[in-house]
Image (cartoon, helix red, strand yellow):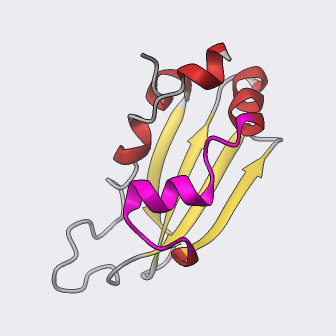
Amino acid sequence: MKTLYDIAKVIRSKNAGPFSITLDVLFESEETYRKVKDSNLINRSLIAKLYKIPEESITELVYFDQAHGIKVTYDRKISSGTIGDRDVYGAQQHAPLMLLPVDDVICG
């Protein structure tokens, strides 16, 4: 089984200010990027499910054709650096996307 980790060049997360997290997925080839984009695999419903957040918390989901990339921004549950925040920089929030199965997208 292939995962998003297997087909993406970069999967990362970072702060988008103290109240938001941004996820970036970048692909080396336009062909792979187009397959993922055209499949609508990465959408608001999926992100909400993977991150256990309401869809309304997703403030941005953009496909950047020129960069062969996808950017998703969502509201943090608690602000960066607040007591109880386990990832001040938002740098470890990409993990749920890594294991996303993509066999249907690549083979289908």
Q: Is residue 31 in the magenta section? A: no
Residue 92 located left or right of residue 43 = left
Q: Residue placed at 75% from the left, 41% from the top?
A: 67
Report the front residue among 53 and 5. Answer: 53
Quadrant, the N terminus: top left
Q: Position of residue 95 (x, y in %)?
A: 35, 45
Residues in magenta, as a range: 39-55
Residue 60 located left or right of residue 90 = right
Q: Position of residue 23 (x, y in %)?
A: 51, 55
Report the front residue among 100 and 91. Answer: 100
Q: Residue placed at 59% from the left, 22% from the top?
A: 104
Q: Residue placed at 44% from the left, 54% from the top?
A: 13
Report the front residue among 103 and 77. Answer: 103
Q: Looking at the picture, does residue 39 appear above or below residue 15?
A: above
| Residue furthest left as drawn | 84
| Residue furthest right as drawn | 66
Report the front residue among 53 and 81. Answer: 53
Quadrant, the C terminus: top right
Q: Position of residue 30 (x, y in %)?
A: 78, 26
Residue 31 located left or right of residue 74 = right
Q: Residue placed at 44% from the left, 43% from the top?
A: 97
Q: How many marks?
A: 0
Q: Position of residue 29 (x, y in %)?
A: 72, 22
Q: Is residue 51 in the magenta section? A: yes
